[in-house]
Image (cartoon, rainbow, N blue to C red):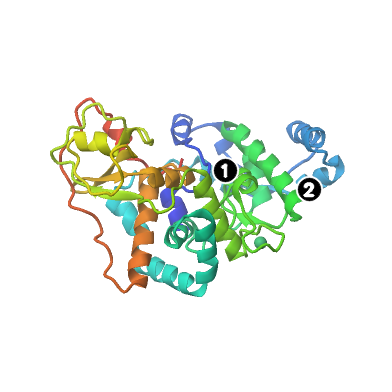
Amino acid sequence: MIPERLARRAFGPSRRIFRALLLTIPLAPWTVAPAAAQAFDPQRDDIAAFIAELAQKHGFEPAPLTALFAQAESKPFILQAIAKPAERTLTWDEYRSKFLIERRISRGVEVHDQRQAELERAQAASGVPADIILGIVGVETFYGENIGKHRVIDALATLAFDYPPRQKFFRNELEQYLVMAREEGIDPLVPVGSYAGAMGLPQFMPSSFRSYAVDGDADGKRDLWNDWPDVFSSVGNYLKVHGWKAGEPVLAAADASNANLAGLDDKLALTETVGSLRARSVKFETGLPSSAPAMLVALKVAAGTEYRVGFTNFYAITRYNRSHMYASAVNDLADAIAATRAGLPLPAASGPPATAPLAPSEPVSGWSTTTSGT
Ligand SMILES: [Ca+2]
């Protein structure tokens, strides 16, 4: 699954960065995994304690949980995948070319044409354009073609019990998963997802599923594996809850070649406004008012740096995956799908790269957001 390896988008929404931690512990003992999958021993102290905790907190019967964990397997592949050092940081043009391929655009147009009414309902409910929803699902799983092949129970239990660096995060996700399965009437042995437990077409982690998944077709179930209306509505709802503003743009191409970037904050946050960026002589076009929150997005390309100005909706997409490049790719895929549907030429791959360097005090590495998904 090339996109997952490149982008390390294994966590879907709410994923966290832990690459830096991994790089400091390359010889940690848990990376020396057994060769074959092994069933968990539910009598193991930490697993027995986890079962007791779930029984106390959520009223689960311990016996079925014990039987469940006896059927879950610790997977060496998952431990290897999670501990794999991040690949070289891709430049934006490299990253973009992985996602903005002709088949991903044309398949997005097909899905739109096949499911237009469902997309329009999701758009009406959330304010998020259908093409952005398709952009997310297209980047995440190629519209469901790459949803992952690991049983979610195996992925989460392996990382919760056999991967100490992230055990707190994954024990919580495992807990959320078991509660989710009970709420949704799902056999927890059945769902599959990424090696890190991201589920379904939109790659929601269990905590995100419980908080943001929506029953888009009102059939009484939230099904992000098979039910397209639920997928579309859930992606729209996730972005809406994370601040999407209906009718507003995601970003604008920018010329920062003569801009004053001194002291500009490189955080993935709306630290500027349309007016403050203009005051720095960043040139871009938007109908948004001067007071509108904004951020300068610096995308490293082979020939220099391509600048964009991201607005509130850009920031909302980064709540799905905390990466400038991810949000930019979703935007560009959405634009390409929209242009193709309208019979227009594809938007330019990128603007002319500006070569103006950041001010010396700027942490340049902080600008080149890695593809490590966060
Ligand atoms: Ca449903």
Who's the residue at 43% across and 58% down the image? 132
From the viewer's side, name the closer residue of 91 and 348.
Answer: 348
Q: Residues within 10 Å of mark 1 (few under 14, many from 20)?
A: many
Who's the residue at 45% across and 29% down the image? 24
From the viewer's side, name the closer residue of 17 and 351.
Answer: 351
Q: Is residue 61 above or below residue 142?
A: above
Q: Residues within 10 Å of mark 2 (few under 14, many from 20)?
A: some
Picture coordinates of residue 365 (x, y %)?
30, 34
Residue 68 is marked as: 2
From the viewer's side, name the closer residue of 23 and 215.
Answer: 215
Residue type at mark 2 is: Leu
- The image quadrant of residue 88 is top left
Picture coordinates of residue 123 (x, y %)?
50, 60
Query: Can the viewer see residue 371 in this picture?
Result: no
Residue 79 is marked as: 1
Ligand 1 quarter of the rendering: bottom right
Q: Is residue 131 above or below residue 50?
A: below
